[in-house]
Structure formats: C-alpha cells, structure tokens
Image (cartoon, rainbow, N blue to C red):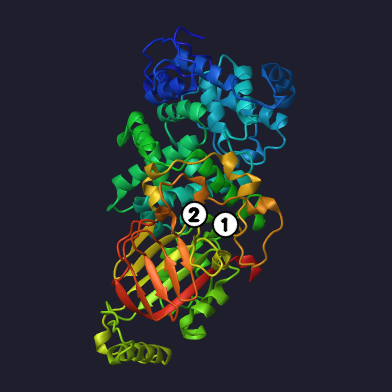
C-alpha cells in the first residue's frame, strides 16, 4: 500500500482523477444511525484509507452463515483453481451471465485479480446460480482491500449474509427477476412521467426495467457507485431501488421532449448513466434518491415476495426469454366495446408487474350478459384482480326528481329513457344526438368480489392499496391510493405482525391465475402487499377501496365516492374521495352505455 492507501491493483493516476483524495479522517461514531448519516453525507468519500477501514468494519459486522470462507481459504484454493491458466484467459463463472467486469480504476493486475476471485467464489458457493452484480462488487472492493484474499473474504461475507431482514445481493434468477418486477412496480408508482415515456418508446417496458441493476453495477462511474455502495452497506437493498429510481427521473428530465439517440431505449439509458457526470453530481443523485418517499422496507419485502410467488407459479425460476408485454394484449384476439387495443395496452402498463404478462380475459360484458349487478358478481367471483371498465352515454343527467307521493311521470319518463338507452345500445343503434360525448373510466381492483359476502348482506369495504381508478376519455388520468403519494398519513406496522398467523389473508391471495379454488397452504395466504392492516391509518376513509351490495357497487370512499354504480348498471355518479384523492372520473352524474369486467389469464393456461 502506498501513502494514500492505494494497493498494487489500482492505477493511481486514474484513481486520482476519479476520486480526489483529501487525506485521512477518523471515524468516531459507531451507532447505526450515525453511520447512516455519515454515509449519506459522504464523510469518507474522499479518504481512500478511511473508506477501506469503513468497508472492512461494516462487512465484518454482517451476520453470516456459520461456515463462511475467509482469506485463508482463498490462499488454499486459488492456485488449484487458476492452475496453469494465465489470469487474462480465465473464464468468468456462468452465474455472472456474460456480464463484463467493470475496470473502474483497476490496472491490468487488478482486472486479472477480479477474475481469480470470482472463480474462487464460484467454487465456494455452488448454490449461486445467477449473480450479474457480483463482478462490479468485487471490482469495487478490490480498490479498498490489502490483497486478493481480503477482497475475497469481504465478498464472501456479503454473499453469506443470513439475516432475512437484510437482503444484499440477488444470487438466483428468481430473486433477480422478482427484483426487476419490483422495480417496475416502484417506477409505475413513483416515476409516472418516466414510466409513460418508457411505455411510449419501448417495445417491451419490462425489458427496460430488467436492466436496472446494470445501471448501478457496471454503468455508473466509480465515484458514483462507491457513494451508492457506502450507503448500501449501511442501509441495505432499498438504497439500490432509490438510486435507480432517481437515475430514471434524471433521464426523463433530460430526455423528455428530445428524440432518443438510438432505436433502443435500454442503450440510451446505459449511455446516460455512463455519462451521468454531465447531468448531476453524486451528491445530487443521492439527494434525489432519498427525497423519494418510498414504501417501507417491510412493505417492499412483501411486494418482492408477491413477485417471487407469481414467478414460481409460472414456473419461471431459471433464465428464459421474456414475453413482450405488448403480446399480452393481442390485437387480433382482443375485442372490447369500450376500449381500443392501444388503450388496453396503456392500462396494462399500469398494473402490477406480476400480472403484466397475463392476458386479458373478458369476464363480464353488459352487452353480452345483460345489465345486472347480480350477473356481474356471478361472472367475476373467483377472479382476482379484475379490471372494471365503464362507458357513459352522455356528459351528465340531472337525476330523477323526488316526489313525496312516490314515482311521478317525470321519474317514470326518466326510467323509460334508461330502458330505451339500453335497447338502443344492445341493438347497436345510434343514440340520440342529445346524449352527447361518451366518456370512459374504470378501476383496477385487487380483490375477489366474493369478499363482499363476508359482511352478512351489509355494505362493507375491502381490497388493498394496489387498487386504483382512472379515466381514459376525454383525457387520461390515473389516481392511486392516497397513501402512496402521502405516506405521512400512516405508519407501517412490523412485518412480524403482518405475517403472523392471525393476520393470514383468506381472500386476497397473491395468485396470478384465475382459478376460483382457494389454496389450503397458509404460505399461499400471507398478508398481501399494501393490505390496510399493515398501516396505522388515522381513519377508515383512506382505505375504502371497493364495496358491493345487491343494489350498488362502490369504488373509493370517504367524503364521496370515486365510482357509484346502481344495481341495474344503468346510472352512476363520480366524485372526489379520500381513498384515492381523485377528481371526478367523468361527468358527476352519468348514464351507462356499457360495463365490462376483465380478468387476468396466464398464457400457459389457455
């Protein structure tokens, strides 16, 4: 090691240019909260020697398996594994998935050492099947290690972490793919403008988000990646989501309204990340990342579990070619009386990732099954989630007048008008000109409608925070659960409470199929992502997602209703509600031309 603490693997000139060393510092704080603040502030970012000491200390404190390979193991096995190969010709382990080793500021000796360390890790961790992030981690650690053996030990401790609440690096394709799905879900909720751009310019938005770890582990320059890794070692995996979301926000800010530089948005984002210094400093990147009011770590863990479960049910546990999301809505097979193929694809881009590869399955159509709420429930029960679509016939109706003596001629005429309207629609005849402009709105509903039966015939609300409402015509707008944008309204409860046997969910399973049979395995009935029981809400008005009775259907409550539909599927109204904090989705009082309910069908079950 030289005077600045650089080892023999580092190109000093490159290192000086990448990260200016301002000399040694001492680290006096030992409490986690203090370390958290120091890491975010970049306290050791400009002291090479201190960063090395901090890494050594933080990694040493990671709880690991009883038998975890250390530096002495490396010394024993490296000669046998490398053998007579020259270091430059060493193959990379299969689990890195052809990922290139980032050089950062390593010299040739350092680049060769990374390959040797990776091969020794593969020898000691035969259970690792997919870990494309590891080359970047090893390369970074080598900058701050005394020798190869110490770097090997650090990497092994990160991989051998056995604290279930402290996820560090994905080591299987299942874990990697579910993290990509989780990132896509987070983008959909926290970067809606960027998500809209991705949907517009990419053939398959899921493939774009599957690249998110590469942005961090490979494309980010060393000075940025090291700052991210500083915080990651203290705070864990959630930091990676935060930084990737911030990168996407900056990409959208810079590129919005500009033509993309290539036909491949994935390549454009990679190029942007490589040259991110032209746009934002490491400090501003982290500032943006921690300004995002993300779900709690426990809630994100539940989302990750839901995505893993969905992948397992689809049999996706090893790497395979993903289906394009656009293929989920086939132009030749899809037909709706309410929305076009393009509009359905737009809606599909909003739904949780674990359902995005499912195909739409028409469950109910008022034009096929009649204008009956009872028939609507019958067709939808046994399916979750579902998508509700409503097409109106006119901008607004005044509503029937009320007479103390009962229904008078005006009310009878109003009812006859509704019956005439249904007759005209069912026969595909043009409606009278006075009807006005049609409007389209709807809701994504997370829970099986059969849940309504648990309230003994009374109207009761159910569902989860994944529900949302939207309008498509005359303009597109989506409204999600108010807690997503205003997390200050609630405080999450512990994950232990969420997963306790007393809080098993008997209706809101995480299944991606449309089977009506409930699983008898308690593991299949763990409390779902964004279940209201996870949050200490000030009142019930922020969690009134969906309700159904014999005479009406309600979506969203508290101070009003986002959607109210009568039992004849004839009339409806819409207004602001506390649960979604929405504006009216169409004219406040409306007549219904058509109602559809769609389910989600796994392509393999067709």
Sort mark 1 into few (<14), some (14-19) or many (20+) by Cα contacts within 10 Å.
few
- SS at mark 2? helix
Q: Quadrant of residue 123?
A: top right
State if disc 2 and disc 1 touch (CB < 8 Å): yes
- Across and down, in percent, residue 90 comes to 65, 31
Residue 72 higher or lower than 352, as above or below: above
Q: Quadrant of residue 431?
A: bottom left
- Across and down, in percent, residue 501 comes to 65, 47
Image quadrant containing the C terminus: bottom right
Q: Return the residue at label 1.
A: 322
- SS at mark 1? loop
Q: Return the residue at label 2.
A: 206
Sort mark 2 into few (<14), some (14-19) or many (20+) by Cα contacts within 10 Å.
many
The foreground one among 100 and 490 is: 490
Residue 516 higher or lower than 424, as above or below: above
The foreground one among 140 and 481 is: 481
Residue 344 higher or lower than 72, as above or below: below
Q: Quadrant of residue 249?
A: top left
- Across and down, in percent, residue 188 comes to 42, 52
The foreground one among 554 and 67 is: 554
The foreground one among 302 and 203 is: 302
Q: State left or right for residue 290 relative to residue 584.
A: right
The answer, for residue 132, to whether it is visible in the render is yes
The answer, for residue 339, to whether it is visible in the render is no
Whole-Å distance between the Cαs marked 1 and 2? 9 Å
Residue at far front of view: 405
């Amino acid at each position: 090691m030289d005077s600045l603490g650089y080892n023999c693997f580092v190109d000093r000139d490159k290192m000086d240019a990448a990260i200016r060393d301002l000399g040694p510092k001492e680290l006096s704080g030992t409490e986690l909260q203090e370390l958290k603040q120091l890491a975010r502030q970049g306290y050791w970012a400009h002291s090479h020697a201190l960063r090395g000491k901090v890494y050594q200390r933080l990694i040493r404190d990671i709880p690991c398996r009883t038998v975890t390979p250390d530096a002495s193991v490396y010394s024993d096995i490296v000669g046998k594994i490398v053998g007579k190969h020259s270091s430059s010709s060493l193959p990379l382990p299969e689990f890195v998935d052809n990922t290139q080793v980032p050089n950062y500021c390593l010299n040739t000796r350092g680049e060769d050492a990374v390959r040797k360390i990776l091969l020794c890790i593969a020898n000691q961790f035969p259970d690792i099947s997919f870990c494309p992030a590891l080359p970047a981690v090893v390369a970074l650690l080598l900058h701050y290690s005394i020798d190869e053996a110490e770097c090997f030990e650090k990497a092994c401790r990160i991989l051998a972490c056995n604290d279930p609440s402290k996820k560090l690096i994905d080591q299987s394709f299942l874990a990697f793919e579910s993290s990509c799905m989780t990132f896509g879900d987070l983008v959909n909720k926290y970067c809606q403008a960027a998500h809209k751009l991705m949907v517009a310019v990419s053939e398959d938005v899921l493939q774009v988000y599957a690249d998110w770890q590469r942005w961090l582990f490979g494309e980010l320059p060393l000075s940025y990646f090291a700052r991210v890794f500083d915080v990651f070692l203290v705070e864990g995996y959630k930091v990676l989501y935060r930084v990737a979301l911030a990168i996407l926000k900056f990409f959208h800010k810079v590129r919005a309204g500009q033509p993309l530089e290539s036909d491949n948005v994935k390549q454009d984002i990679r190029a942007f990340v490589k040259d991110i210094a032209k746009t934002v400093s490491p400090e501003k990147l982290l500032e943006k990342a921690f300004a995002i009011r993300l779900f709690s770590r426990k809630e994100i863990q539940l989302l990750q579990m839901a995505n893993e479960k969905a992948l397992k049910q689809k049999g996706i546990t090893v790497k395979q070619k993903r289906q394009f999301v656009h293929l989920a809505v086939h132009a030749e097979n899809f037909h709706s009386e309410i929305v076009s193929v393009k509009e359905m694809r737009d809606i599909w881009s909003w739904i949780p990732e674990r359902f995005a590869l499912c195909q739409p399955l028409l469950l109910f159509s008022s034009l096929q099954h009649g204008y009956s709420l009872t028939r609507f429930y019958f067709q939808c029960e046994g399916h979750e989630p579902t998508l509700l679509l409503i097409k109106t016939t006119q901008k607004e109706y005044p509503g029937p007048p009320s007479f103390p003596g009962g229904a008078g001629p005006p009310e009878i005429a109003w009812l006859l008008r509704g019956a005439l309207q249904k007759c005209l629609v069912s026969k595909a005849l043009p409606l009278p000109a006075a009807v006005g402009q049609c409007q389209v709105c709807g809701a994504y509903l997370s829970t099986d409608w059969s849940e309504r039966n648990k309230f003994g015939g009374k109207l009761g609300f159910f569902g989860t925070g994944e529900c949302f409402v939207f309008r498509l015509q005359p303009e597109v707008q989506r409204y999600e659960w108010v807690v997503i944008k205003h997390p200050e309204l609630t405080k999450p409860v512990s994950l232990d409470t969420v997963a306790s046997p007393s809080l098993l969910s008997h209706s809101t399973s995480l299944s991606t199929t449309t089977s009506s049979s409930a699983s008898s395995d308690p593991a299949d009935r763990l409390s779902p992502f964004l279940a209201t029981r996870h949050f200490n809400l000030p009142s019930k008005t922020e969690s009134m997602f969906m309700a159904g009775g014999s005479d009406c259907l309600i979506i969203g409550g508290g101070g009003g209703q986002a959607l109210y539909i009568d039992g004849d599927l004839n009339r409806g109204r819409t207004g602001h509600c506390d649960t979604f904090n929405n504006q009216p989705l169409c004219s406040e009082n409306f007549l219904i031309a058509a109602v559809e309910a769609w389910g989600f069908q796994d392509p393999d079950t067709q």
